[in-house]
Image: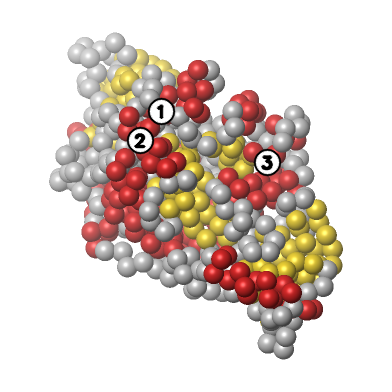
C-alpha cells in the first residue's frame, strides 16, 4: 500500500473502534513489549499493540480481546517498542540515490517517515523534477513527505540555475497530495528585506495551512534574524552553537539540529537541553545531507539518536526529538510520531534504548525490515530519458579553461581563498600569497584551484578561484556534478591538465563524481539522473562512493567526509566565501569579489 492509497484515520475509524472494543479482529498484535510512550516520556513494560488496516487500534497490558485465529502475532520478547523514526529535514539527492533506493537503504535503520526537500533536482529539472521525486516518494512503503522547494536559485543574481521556481509554482504544488510544506527558505536576506517573491511563496504555503521550512545561515541574531522569523519560517537547521539553538527556540521556531555525513551540529547545540534545561519540545533531530556510504555503513536517524544520547541526552528525550516533536511540527501528530490509537503502525523493536539496535521494523502495519535487511519492495519511477541527459557542455575543455591570469608583470599575488571548515557547512574567507608562473597564478602548498563549469545551458563558461583545507598533494583533480544548489560542475585540483580530464570525463558519462591522479582515473561514481542520483542499489553506489573517498585520501585529503564539503562549495547562501557560475561570492555581503586582491 503506497502513501497515496493509505487510508486516512476517518476512513478506518469504525474498524479502529471495533477492534479496540474487541468486536472485531486485529490484523496484527505485538505482544509482551515495553511501550515507549513519547507523549509522557515513559517506558511501560508488559504492553501489547493491536493493529488493523495499517493503524494502531489499541495499546494496553492485554490486547487479547482483539485477537482471533487469523491475527498475526509478533512476540516482542520484552523488547522496547518505539515509534518509527522521523527525519525532520533532509535531501534524498544527497544520498546519491533515487527515493526508492534511499527508502530501501534507510528502512532497516528504522526510519519510517522523512520530510524531504528536493531542491537539488529543482535546480536542474525544475518543477518537473520535483514532481518526479514527489511521485516516486508516494510509491514507497514508508512515509516520504515532500516539501516544495522555495529557492531555485537560492540567491537570485548570484547564480544561474537550470530552472527557476516561482511563487505560482509553489502555490500550485501546495495542492499535490504528498506536499507537506515549503522547503528551506534559503534566501534569508530576501525574507529579511521583504522580497515580494519570497513573501508570496510563504503566504501561499500558509494559506494552504502547511509548514514553512527555514534556513538562516548567518551568525547575526539581531534585527535581521528577527525580521526573518517575522517573515514566517517555522524551523531552522543552520545553527552551529548553543546560542543558535536557544535563539531559535526563544523566537518560537523549532531548532533542527543535524548529524549528516559531514555536519556535526548536535553536540554543540543539544546542551541547550542537557545543560541549560530548556524545554525539549522545540528541538528536532535531522540529517540534512547523508551520502550513500553513511546510510549503508553507519545508519540514518538511528545514528543521530545514538549520537544525541552519547552527547548526554536522556534516551527518551532523544527519541521524542526524532518522533513526536517532528510529527507535531508538521501537524501530523495525530497520524505519525507515537504508538497510540489511530496513528500509523510504524513500530521498531529494539533490545536497548541507548545503543538502539534496530531488530524489527514495522511500517503501516507490516514488517518491512528484519535484522538489518529490507524485506519489502521499493518501487521505481520510470525516469524519462531527458532526466538522464543533463550535463550540457558544448565543447571539450582544455588546460586554458582553468588558467587564472595574474596582473601584468607580477611575480606573486594576494588571492581571496575559500577556506573549508571540517564538519561544518560554513567556509572562511581567507587570503594567501600565491606564486605566478608565465603570467598565471599557481595553486601551491595547502591551496588548490577550484573551478565552476556551467552545465545547464552549454554556455562554455568556466569560473576559476582558489580553495584551501583539502590538503591535496601531487598532481590530481576531482570533479562533481553535485554542486549545491545550482548543480553546475565543481572541479577542485592541483593541476589544470587533471582538472580538464576530470571535467571532460563527467561530460562523457552524463554526470557524477570522478577523481584523476597523474593522468589516470582513480574513482568514478556515475549519477545519471540529473547528474545527482543513481537508481542502482544503495550498496552498489556506496561501494563506489567509498572508493571515491579512499581516492581522496590517497590524494592527501584528511578531512572527515570531504566529499560533502566539496559538494557545497557553490552554495551561495552559506557564509563566508563561495563560487558560482557568475563569480566568487562573498556571502557576508552577498556581493561578488575578485579572486586577485587589487
Kindly indicate the quadrant of the structure image that contains residue 369.
Answer: bottom right
Instruction: Give the residue at x 30% y 50%.
Output: 127
Toward which corner of the image does residue 16 lie, by quadrant?
bottom right
Q: Secondary structure at mark 2?
A: helix
Q: Residues within 10 Å of mark 2 (few under 14, many from 20)?
A: some
Q: Is residue 214 left or right of residue 280?
A: left
Identified at 38% across, 56% down, the residue is 176
Instruction: Check the picture and name the quadrant holding the C terminus.
Output: top left
The answer to which of 410 and 478 lies nearer the viewer is 478
Q: Earlier in the sequence, mark 1 or mark 3?
A: 1
Pointer 3 residue: 281
Q: Is residue 31 above or below residue 556?
A: below
Disc 2 designates what residue?
A: 200
Mark 1 to mark 2 CA distance (whole Å): 10 Å
Residue 321 versus residue 296 in the image, above or below: above
The alpha-carbon separation of the residues under discs 3 and 2 comes to: 29 Å
Q: Look at the numbered disc 1 and give the secondary structure of its residue.
A: helix
In this rendering, the label closer to the viewer, 3 or 2: 2
Q: Is residue 422 visible?
A: no
Residue 488 is situated, as x and y percent measured from the top left of the image, at: 29, 42
Circle 1 crowding by C-alpha within 10 Å: few under 14, some 14–19, many from 20: many
Residue nearest the viewer, comparing 252 with 568: 252
Q: Is residue 85 left or right of residue 30?
A: left
**Residue with the mark numbered 1:** 191
Compare marks 1 and 2 and give the one earlier in the sequence: 1
Counting from the top left corner in percent of width and height, residue 280 is at 70, 39
Q: Residue 76: horizontal and vertical position, in percent?
A: 77, 71
Amino acid at each position: 500500500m503506497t502513501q497515496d492509497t493509505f487510508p486516512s484515520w476517518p476512513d478506518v475509524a469504525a474498524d479502529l473502534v471495533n477492534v479496540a472494543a474487541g468486536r472485531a479482529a486485529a490484523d496484527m498484535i505485538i505482544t509482551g513489549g515495553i511501550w515507549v510512550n513519547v507523549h509522557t516520556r515513559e517506558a511501560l513494560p508488559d504492553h501489547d499493540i493491536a493493529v488493523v488496516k495499517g493503524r494502531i487500534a489499541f495499546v494496553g497490558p492485554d490486547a487479547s480481546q482483539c485477537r482471533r485465529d487469523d491475527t498475526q502475532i509478533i512476540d516482542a520478547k520484552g523488547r522496547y517498542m518505539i515509534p518509527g523514526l522521523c527525519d525532520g529535514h533532509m535531501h534524498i539527492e544527497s544520498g546519491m540515490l533515487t527515493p526508492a533506493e534511499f527508502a530501501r537503504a534507510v528502512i532497516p535503520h528504522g526510519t519510517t517517515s522523512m520530510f524531504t526537500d528536493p531542491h537539488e533536482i529543482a535546480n536542474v529539472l525544475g518543477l518537473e523534477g520535483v514532481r518526479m521525486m514527489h511521485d516516486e516518494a508516494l510509491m514507497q512503503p514508508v512515509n516520504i513527505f515532500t516539501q516544495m522547494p522555495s529557492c531555485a536559485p537560492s540567491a537570485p543574481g548570484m547564480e544561474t540555475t537550470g530552472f527557476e521556481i516561482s511563487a505560482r509554482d509553489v502555490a500550485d504544488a501546495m495542492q499535490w497530495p504528498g506536499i507537506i510544506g515549503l522547503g528551506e527558505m534559503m534566501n534569508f536576506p530576501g525574507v529579511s528585506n521583504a522580497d515580494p517573491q519570497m513573501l508570496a511563496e510563504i503566504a501561499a504555503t500558509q494559506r494552504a495551512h502547511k509548514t514553512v521550512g527555514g534556513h538562516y545561515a548567518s551568525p547575526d541574531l539581531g534585527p535581521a534574524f528577527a525580521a526573518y522569523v517575522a517573515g514566517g519560517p517555522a524551523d531552522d537547521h543552520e545553527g552551529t552553537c548553543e546560542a543558535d539553538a536557544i535563539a531559535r527556540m526563544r523566537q518560537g521556531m523549532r531548532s533542527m539540529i543535524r548529524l549528516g555525513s559531514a555536519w556535526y551540529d548536535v553536540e554543540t547545540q543539544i546542551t541547550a537541553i542537557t545543560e541549560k534545561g530548556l524545554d525539549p519540545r522545540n528541538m528536532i533531530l535531522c540529517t540534512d545531507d547523508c551520502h550513500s556510504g553513511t546510510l549503508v555503513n553507519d545508519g540514518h536517524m538511528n545514528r543521530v539518536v545514538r549520537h544525541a544520547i552519547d552527547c548526554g541526552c536522556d534516551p527518551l528525550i532523544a527519541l521524542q526529538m526524532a518522533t513526536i516533536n517532528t510529527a507535531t511540527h508538521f501537524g501530523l501528530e495525530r497520524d505519525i510520531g507515537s504508538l497510540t490509537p489511530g496513528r500509523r503502525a510504524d513500530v521498531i523493536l529494539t533490545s536497548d534504548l541507548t545503543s538502539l539496535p534496530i531488530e524489527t521494523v514495522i511500517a503501516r502495519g507490516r514488517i518491512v525490515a528484519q535484522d538489518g535487511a529490507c524485506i519489502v519492495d521499493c518501487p521505481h519511477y520510470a525516469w524519462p530519458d531527458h532526466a538522464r541527459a543533463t550535463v550540457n557542455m558544448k565543447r571539450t575543455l582544455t588546460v586554458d579553461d582553468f588558467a587564472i591570469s595574474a596582473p601584468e608583470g607580477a611575480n606573486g599575488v594576494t588571492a581571496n581563498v575559500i577556506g573549508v571548515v571540517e564538519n561544518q557547512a560554513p567556509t572562511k574567507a581567507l587570503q594567501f600569497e600565491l606564486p605566478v608562473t608565465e603570467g598565471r597564478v599557481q595553486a601551491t602548498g595547502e591551496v588548490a584551484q577550484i573551478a565552476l563549469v556551467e552545465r545547464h545551458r552549454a554556455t562554455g563558461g568556466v569560473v576559476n578561484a582558489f580553495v584551501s583545507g583539502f590538503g591535496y598533494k601531487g598532481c590530481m583533480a576531482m570533479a562533481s556534478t553535485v554542486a549545491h544548489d545550482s548543480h553546475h560542475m565543481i572541479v577542485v585540483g592541483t593541476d589544470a591538465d587533471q582538472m580538464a580530464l576530470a571535467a571532460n570525463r563527467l561530460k562523457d558519462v552524463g554526470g557524477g563524481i570522478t577523481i584523476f591522479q597523474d593522468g589516470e582515473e582513480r574513482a568514478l561514481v556515475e549519477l545519471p539522473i540529473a547528474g545527482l542520483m543513481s537508481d542502482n542499489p544503495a550498496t552498489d553506489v556506496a561501494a563506489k562512493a567509498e572508493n571515491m573517498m579512499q581516492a581522496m585520501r590517497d590524494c592527501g585529503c584528511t578531512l572527515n567526509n570531504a566529499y560533502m564539503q566539496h559538494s557545497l562549495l557553490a552554495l551561495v547562501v552559506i557564509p563566508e566565501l563561495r563560487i558560482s557560475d557568475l563569480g566568487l561570492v562573498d556571502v557576508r555581503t552577498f556581493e561578488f569579489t575578485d579572486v586577485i586582491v587589487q
